[in-house]
Amino acid sequence: MRALLLAAGLGSRLQPLTNFLPKCLMPINGRPLLDYWIENLLMQGVDQILINTHYQAALVTDYLRQSSWNNRVTLVHEGRLLGTAGTALANRDFFRDEPFLIAHADNLTRFNCTEFIDTHRRRPDKAALTMMLFETEDPRSCGIVDLDKDGIVQEFHEKVANPPGNLANAAIYIVEPVVVEYMATLGKPEIDFSTEVIPHFMGRISTFLNHSYHRDIGTIKSWTEAQRDFGMPPALPENELAWNRLMASLDPELPRLMSNLTTN
């Protein structure tokens, strides 16, 4: 299986850190999110990854070219952001008309990818995609789902004032080619997955519950909390060296800033 790993986010709520680094390279306990994601996917059932870039793309490119992942990653630059579905559609040839995984590199998660893939393969016949879920402590900040007895999404409530539960969309999916075919019928390059694709497939979305860990690294508060509650496994030596080289090339104010944020 191949994967689309979205790494183009601007990260305005992570300023001032994103004045120096893109969201996908935010370090958690000394290791960039992107490296953690790539290793997890490639070691658990994914063979090739497409990564889109936009903001501070040169840093992402420089890091990956020096990493051990270089031969298994394809980079595509977006001068204008296309949205999750728009990126998938624009690069549909990469996925070879086969099922593929979609994830966001600015999320921090721990899950068994092989189990996720197996769950999708055992989905009900009517399901066109599988959505990962997690139990959130703040349902009003997430997209909350209602499920039937078979775990199929019946309703989707995007950041509403009175959500009906705490099962949230983790924005990690495995999609069948029919989903991309639907995207193509929309006749435009920029397509949002949550608002333009999910509603069309309501009643045809199976689910996989992540019982382990999931956090959106979208704010300074979330980033600092992740430093405290996530046990980040070490990077491979070659990738740790690539990361250290990148950090050494940046403004020396960045390490001081990160240290201040995590100790205050």
Image: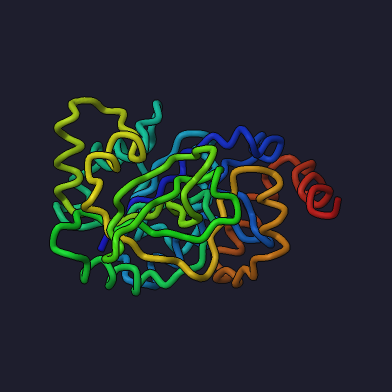
Colour scheme used in the picture? Answer: rainbow
Residue located 27% across and 73% down the image: 118
- Residue 229, compared with residue 184, is above or below; it is below
- Residue 203, compared with residue 87, is above or below; it is below
Tell me residue 26's x, y (percent): 61, 50
Front residue of 116/205: it is 205
Quadrant in which the N terminus is drawn: bottom left
Instruction: Locate residue 4 relative to residue 25 in the image: left or right.
Output: left
- Residue 83, compared with residue 33, is above or below; it is above
Instruction: Locate residue 209 relative to residue 183 in the image: left or right.
Output: right
Front residue of 194/233: it is 194
Front residue of 163/47: it is 163
Tell me residue 151's x, y (percent): 30, 63
Tell me residue 133's x, y (percent): 42, 59
- Residue 86, picture quadrant: top left
Instruction: Tell me if I can see residue 175 in this picture.
Output: no
Instruction: Locate residue 50 relative to residue 237 in the image: left or right.
Output: left
How many marks overall? 0
Front residue of 136/45: it is 136
Instruction: Tell me if I can see residue 25 in this picture.
Output: yes
Tell me residue 190's x, y (percent): 31, 28
Residue located 59% across and 44% down the image: 218
- Residue 215, picture quadrant: bottom right
Residue located 70% across and 44% down the image: 220
Residue located 64% across and 66% down the image: 230
